[in-house]
Structure formats: C-alpha cells, structure tokens
Amino acid sequence: MCKTMAVALRRSLVTLVKDLGVPRWQQLASRPLSVSAGLCNSKSPMARADGTFKVTMVPGDGVGPELMTAVKDVFKAGNIPVEFEEFHLSEVQNMATEEKLEQVLTSLRNNRVAIKGKIHTPMEFKGELASYEMKLRRKLDLFANVVHVNSLPGYNTRHNNLDLVIIREQTEGEYSSLEHESVSGVIECLKIITREKSRRIAKFAFDYATKKGRNKVTAVHKANIMKLGDGLFLQSCAEVAQLYPKIKYENIIIDNCCMQLVQNPYQFDVLVMPNLYGNIIDNLAAGLVGGAGVVPGESYSAEYAVFETGARHPFAQAVGRNIANPTAMLLSAANMLRHLNLEYHSQMVTDAVKKVIKQGKVRTGDLGGYATSDEFTRAVIANLAV
C-alpha cells in the first residue's frame, strides 16, 4: 500500500513540476522516494498541494538571526521547497512571553519540524526558574538530543577522521528547574532521574545505533557518587542493552570520559547520557573537530523534530560583526531536509558546504581564515548543484 502511494505521489509531483515549468524536473523524476524514511507515517511532515513544506523558524539570540539569514539565502538559491514561519523568541531582548511561546508551539505542532538558534538564558533570577528554552523542550517533550561529531575533510585538527554520536536526555536531570533556599545562604537543587525517561533515552540510543549500523553504545554517568540517581540511569541502560545483543554495551564515568575523548576519541561510537553531561560532552566533542561553528544537532520527540547547532552557543560577542561560521546551521538545515525526505536537496547543501571547507579558500576566523559569514555563504551558494 505504501509503495503504491509513493509511486503515485512521485508521478503527481513530476506532473506538478512540469506544469510549473521548473527546471531539472527530469532529475526529480528519476530520484526514488524513500518509503522507509517516514512517508507512510501519519505523523511525518507531508508536502502541501504546491509541493512545499512549512517549517517553523526560531532565530534565537546572538548570531542566530545572522545564521538563519544564511540558511534562507542558500535555500532560495537552491530552489528548495521549504517555506519558513519565523518567530522571534528571546529572553534577553524582551521578546519572550507566554503568548509568543504559545505561537511558536502552535506553529511547531502544525508543521512538526523546526529550525532554531540558541535562545539565551539569563543568569539573573527574575522570579521564574525554567527558561523558555526548557519550556519549549518540555511542552513538546523533546527528550532526545543527537549530535553527530564528524571531522570535516580539508580542516585538520589534532584528531582527524572522527565519527561519533552523542545522545543526550534533555527533559530532566539537573535541568529540572527545582531549586529552593532551605535556610538563608543554603540552596538545594534537585536532580530528577526517572526510570521511564532513562529507559526511553537508552532505547533511543540503541535504536539509533541499530538503524545507523553502529557497533557500540557507551553510557556516561557518575554513579560512583550519585549512587541512586545516576545509579538508576546506569541500571536502566544496562537493562535496555540486554534487548540488543548485537550492539556492544559499555559504561564510563563522566570525568574519565572527558579525558578519554581528548586522548583517544576513536574508541567511542554512540554515547548516551543524562542532561548536564550531554551539554558538557557536546561542547567538548565539538572542540575536537573545529568548534561550535561546525557541528550540527537535532532534538526529537515522538512527534516533533527541531534542528539546531550541536554546541549551543549564542556567540553574542560576534553579533553584527559578520564573522560567525554558518557551517553548523547549514548542516543542521541539510539534516532537516533529509528528515523531510528531500534527500536530493539535503545532499546538495551538504556537498556545497563540505566542498567550500575542503577547498580551503574561504574560511571564517574560527577555522583559521579571514572570510566573513557572507563570503562563506556566497561560496556555498556558488557550489550548489542547481
């Protein structure tokens, strides 16, 4: 039934493209549609009658808006069939209200896919502990954050040819927003670990490893000190591991994991961990392949997918200076296109970004060059196979 639907949809798309007079329709017609990628899943995003996908865009703070401009410019140049619904949500620019948050949530619930920048969380306490970033994750139940750390050909770092995946539970743990002052000068912060969510993220990690042909999953913890909290997380991972006998399972203490990543990151394949550890490891691992500007990321719930940079950093000091590296956001956008079953367009953007980096002629400051963000974006556009 699904294959029949796929063939029918491809034929209708080809007819539509012919009618519109869009060039390259012959190439579109020859590319197979992916049934396994979610075409028959009722919750998967489907193209509108005009063949475009609606995607929610939240630029965020710092250089987020500038990076989103790069994404929009590349999508326009590549004739990519995506229409963005843009919402500005910011705590530091006084553009964050419950009403605005609800607008973003409504859009995302309709579109089921979003691309976003980092929504900066102020350190000052203003009467509410949960940030809008956390509210967004919890209301959509974006429990799994995935960061694929991959070396970029053409940019040499201390460790080259890296290929590892960091999977982070991001709805509980130290980010539970449960703090109180028990007596004057004494603050208690509650770290919440539940069996249900620990098993869920462990299963996600093993399912990911199975689907992507990965061989090993490593659970990262501090159960030697937090015997009950991290102990429950570790126990849950071990229980789930028994259901996947073909995947090797190990565990490692967080501090040793940091050292091992710096010394010998090749020993890792897929790492799964609670919230705070994932935040730390994401940034550490990004530094191994070039920094916050080059690593894409994504967050998933059962229904929604949000694409963002792997190392969440607003880079506020670069605002307006035209120096931010668009690579991470462009690769995140390419991953979003793959999620939408736009495989051709996804590969087109990925290839263009990687070609610019491999050529080494146009490099932003974080990669040892002097190119501006705009120059890098123009170079990517020039390399699009349109």
Image: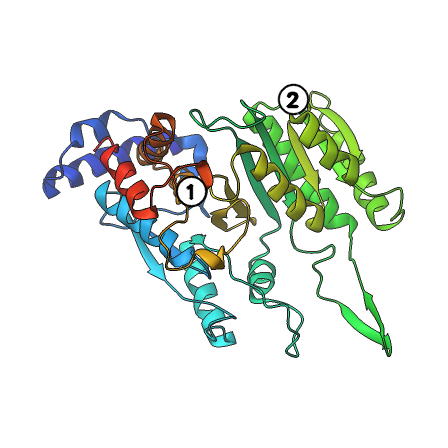
Q: Residues within 10 Å of mark 1 (few under 14, many from 20)?
A: some
- Residue 240 located left or right of residue 347: right
Asked whether the viewer can see residue 30, the reply is yes
> Which quadrant does the C terminus fall into?
top left
**Residue type, label 1:** Gly
The image position of residue 250, as x and y in percent, is 77, 28
User: Which circle, 1 or 2, is nearer the viewer?
Assistant: 1
Label 1 sits on residue: 365
| Picture layout, residue 165 above or below residue 76 | above
* Picture mark count: 2
Task: Name the side, left or right, on which 345 lies relative to 98.
Answer: left
* Quadrant in which residue 126 is drawn: bottom right
Where disc 1 sits, the SS reads helix
Viewer-nearest residue: 39 or 79: 79
Residue 280: percent from left, percent from top: 67, 46
Left or right of 300 in this view: 279: right
Q: Earlier in the sequence, mark 1 or mark 2?
A: 2
- The alpha-carbon separation of the residues under discs 1 and 2 comes to 36 Å
* Residue placed under numbered mark 2 in the picture: 215
Res 242 seen here = no
Asked which quadrant contains residue 88, the reply is bottom left
Name the one closer to the observer, 26 or 330: 330
Which quadrant would residue 134 be assigned to in this image?
Answer: bottom right
Between 164 and 207, the one lying in front of the other is 164
Residue displayed at 33% across by 46% down = 372
- Describe the element under mark 2 as helix, strand or loop: loop
Residues 216 and 379: in front is 379
- On the image, the x and y values in percent for residue 360 come to 36, 29
Q: Position of residue 347 (x, y in %)?
A: 35, 31
**Residue type, mark 2 in image:** Asn
Left-right relation of 95 to 226: left
